[in-house]
Image: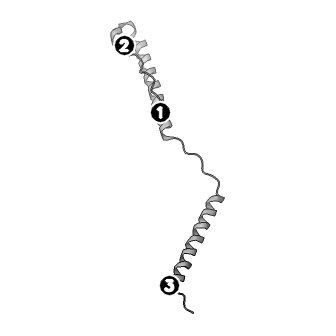
Amino acid sequence: MPIAMNDERIIVAVGRLERALARAEAAAARPPSAPVADPDEELRARHQRLRDSTQAAIARLDTLLGPAVDPALEVSPAPEEPR
């Protein structure tokens, strides 16, 4: 007896479901991947390191220049950024 068109579609659909189930089972058997670092947190940390090194460089320049610098030109530290 020939397979009807409707039966063929069901067979194809069942095959797709079986393959999807096999992929899901394989994924479940794998160990979980390492958590991904928050890119925003990494950017904030890089920004803070840059600020720290810049402030240290300015402090070294202030030490080298000493009292010859006009106090009116001094730059106050930037306010802390909200998180």
- Closer to the observer: label 2 or label 3? 3
Numbered disc 2: secondary structure: loop
Numbered disc 1: secondary structure: helix
Q: CA distance from mark 1 to mark 3?
A: 60 Å
- Closer to the observer: label 1 or label 3? 3
Query: Split into 4 quadrants, where in the image is the N terminus?
Result: bottom right
Numbered disc 3: secondary structure: helix
Numbered circle sitting on residue 74: 2
Label 3 is placed on what type of residue? Met
Numbered circle sitting on residue 19: none
Label 2 is placed on what type of residue? Glu
Q: Earlier in the sequence, mark 2 or mark 1?
A: 1
Please identify the quarter of the rendering in which residue 50 is found.
top left
User: Percent from the top left, x then y, of residue 46?
Assistant: 47, 33
Q: Earlier in the sequence, mark 1 or mark 3?
A: 3
Q: Earlier in the sequence, mark 2 or mark 3?
A: 3
Establish if 74 lies above or below 25.
above
User: Percent from the top left, x then y, of residue 78?
Assistant: 41, 21
Can you identify the residue that label 1 sits on? 44
Residue lying furthest front: 6
* Labels 2 & 1 near each other (Cβ < 8 A): no
Can you identify the residue that label 3 sits on? 5
Please identify the quarter of the rendering in which residue 15 is found.
bottom right
